[in-house]
Image: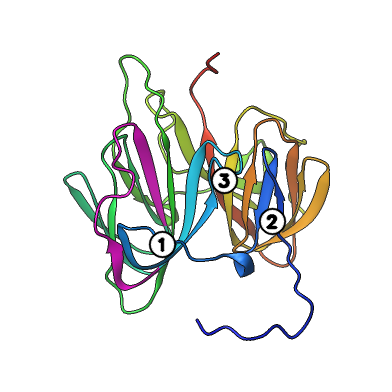
Amino acid sequence: MKMSYPSDLLSTRAVIKPGLFAVIPKEGLVNNVIPYIQKCKVSIVASPKMGANFVEYVVTAEPEGGTTSAFGKEEHTESFLYCISGTLDVKVGEQQATLTDGGYVYAPAGVGIHFENTGETAAKLLLYKQIYIPWEGVSPHICVGNTNDIPYRIYDEMSNVYIKDLLPTDIGFDMNMHILAFEPGGCHPFVETHVQEHGAYILSGEGMYLMDDTWMGIKKEDFMWFGPYVPQCAYGVGRELFAYIYSKDCNRDVTL
């Protein structure tokens, strides 16, 4: 993309509070060279360098762009891919699938995900990886699906707030991915303060979000990270559904 001199003073909506939370708008994203990902613009939006216990990426894949080696194939690393837009061929273990808008795939630890943009235009996707915490006698399995095939359910008995679970909720999984959506005027039922951390990418709309002690406007294509115990909640504002896909660690005790 051709860059030009700014027409005004440089400014940003980005807010980075290491160990607490981060808001990263798309305008500030820069490209990172990842040796095994080609013909892609890759922005690392969450990592242990800011305090997160996972790594998340926003990726734009040009036609024929993708992996030359599996993403998240390390022995103890589990991984997830979400197709925001475009067409991707993916391979997870021996399984192959074609993902379109809303498609996703989860790979258990050590399996990894191959992807390639097989469309004629750029594809946009999210990549996510973290260390899997095993539990005796159970294990996760490969999951392939599309969020458009999953109906929303009412969130905490609030008729204007909805949620989707993308992964199974059984004890073999130590993480999940959800889509949370607010009609204009919808909100969390209370200010949440919990041990789980979240990485959240805004899929549509606008919201007012409380993180720690700061209210701020959030909109489509922003990325947010919340650290453990950071108070957080949101109101949906604007004219359309305020919706985001977010990660959650779950089903495990805290180790000392």
127 shown above or below 48: below
Where is mark 1, residue-wise? 33
Report the label total: 3
The residue range painted magenta reads: 61-82
Q: Nearer the viewer, residue 82 or 205?
A: 82
User: Image quadrant of residue 29?
Assistant: bottom right
User: Image quadrant of residue 211?
Assistant: top right
Report, in whole angstroms, how far the alpha carbon at label 2 lies from the one at label 1. Answer: 38 Å
How many residues crowd mark 3 within 10 Å: few (<14), some (14–19), many (20+)?
Answer: many
Q: Nearer the viewer, mark 2 or mark 3?
A: 3
Residue 74 left/right relative to 191: left
The residue at 72%/31% (across/down) is 193
Where is mark 3, residue-wise? 199
Do residues under tags 2 and 1 come within 8 Å of each other at their CB atoms?
Answer: no
Q: Position of residue 194 (x, y in %)?
A: 67, 28
Where is mark 2, residue-wise? 183
- Dot 1 falls on a residue whose secondary structure is loop
Q: Position of residue 248 (x, y in %)?
A: 54, 36
Residue 104 left/right relative to 111: right
Viewer can see residue 92: yes
**Structure colour scheme:** rainbow
Residue 74 numbered mark, or none: none
Question: What kind of residue is marked 1?
Answer: Val
User: Image quadrant of residue 34?
Assistant: bottom left
Q: Is residue 7 magenta?
A: no
Q: Position of residue 59 (x, y in %)?
A: 44, 62
